[in-house]
Image (tube, rainbow, N blue to C red):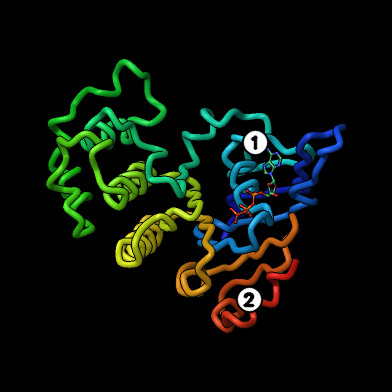
Amino acid sequence: MSTLLDLKNITTTVNAGTKEEKKILKNINLQLADGDFVTLLGTNGAGKSTLLNIINGSLFPSEGHVILDKEDLTAWSEVKRAKYISQVFQDPKMGTAPRMTVAENLLLATKRGEHRGLRMRGLDKHLAEFKKITAKLPNGLSERLDTFVGNLSGGQRQTLSFLMATIKKPKLLLLDEHTAALDPNTSHQLLELTNQVVQKDHLTCVMITHQLKDALRYGNRIVILNNGKIVLDVCGEEKNKLTEKAILQYFTD
Ligand SMILES: Nc1ncnc2c1ncn2[C@@H]1O[C@H](COP(=O)(O)OP(=O)(O)OP(=O)(O)O)[C@@H](O)[C@H]1O
């Protein structure tokens, strides 16, 4: 497998030069192979979201490089990276436009990276496809294509965010506790859909979770961060042998 993402010597310092100066990520080196599905774990404040922010470009590293598909993205803006990198956040309100309908949101997602003026054209010819993909979960989203997104339930809205993030196959999919705000049943359904889509489209994915069971169940690789450093990185058989008890040993302060 070839390397898709290469994080080289990533260090992130916030409030540099002040009393509040803090190193959040400390010389992180991480390579993701094409098709890797990583579950990213760690205590509160370990630096997991910061690491995703460094990858998606909403935060620039103080030192180091972000290489995607052999291209150095370190100086690229978040908007420029969005052509290749999709993210779903914990808050169902993020990533969707509340005053547009479900179908319009999906149309926007299919036209990611295209000229703004052309993005709302051709809704009718996509409707059958939108009906089909929204029917993947039994939560009524497929019956609400004409509904304004602001009127959806949190579960429906988060399903939409996920479908939007993956409708145009991204090079890299980042999931920041994307099911944490959902009830257990809805969370399970969306995680199963996530797994299906990642496998079927051979996506490379990093999923932050606090649920050890989910980290063990999904993905081929587990990475644990502690205090800004990678303290465990295992894949394949080694990952399969891990237990919740073994993982908890890496959750020290
Ligand atoms: N812009 C910032 N300025 C100051 N401190 C920050 C900033 N961004 C993050 N931090 C701090 O860096 C640490 C890591 O934050 P981060 O959100 O990456 O952790 P996390 O592992 O995602 O935690 P959680 O599991 O609670 O979501 C925290 O102590 C946080 O308060």
Q: Residue at x 58, y 58 (%)?
A: 33
Q: Is residue 18 above or below residue 158?
A: above
Name the quadrant containing residue 197.
bottom left
Q: Residue 246 location, x and y as percent?
A: 64, 81
| Residue at numbered disc 2 | 247
Callout 1 crowding tier (Cα within 10 Å): few <14, some 14–19, many ≥20: some
What amino acid is found at the position of numbered circle 1 in the picture? Answer: Leu
The disc placed on residue 68 is none
Q: Is residue 217 above or below residue 67?
A: below
Instruction: Classify residue 182 as left or right of residue 132.
Output: right
Residue 253 drawn at (x, y percent): 75, 66
Horizontally, residue 96 falls left or right of residue 131, namely right
User: For residue 66, which quarter of the picture?
Assistant: top right
What is the spatial separation of the Cα atoms under label 2 and label 1, in whole angstroms? 28 Å
| Residue 49 in picture, x, y percent from top left | 60, 49
| Residue 200 in view of the camera | no
Q: Is residue 227 above or below residue 118?
A: below
**Earlier residue among tags 2 and 1:** 1
Q: Does mark 1's beta carbon lie closer than 8 Å to ligand 1?
A: yes
The residue wearing badge 1 is 59
Kindly state the secondary structure of the residue where label 1 is placed: loop
Q: What's the residue type where badge 2 is placed?
A: Ile
Q: Quadrant of residue 251?
A: bottom right
In the image, taking residue 144 as reference, residue 220 lies left or right, namely right
How many marks overall? 2
In the picture, the quarter occupied by the N terminus is bottom right
Can residue 80 be seen?
yes
9 shown above or below 187: above
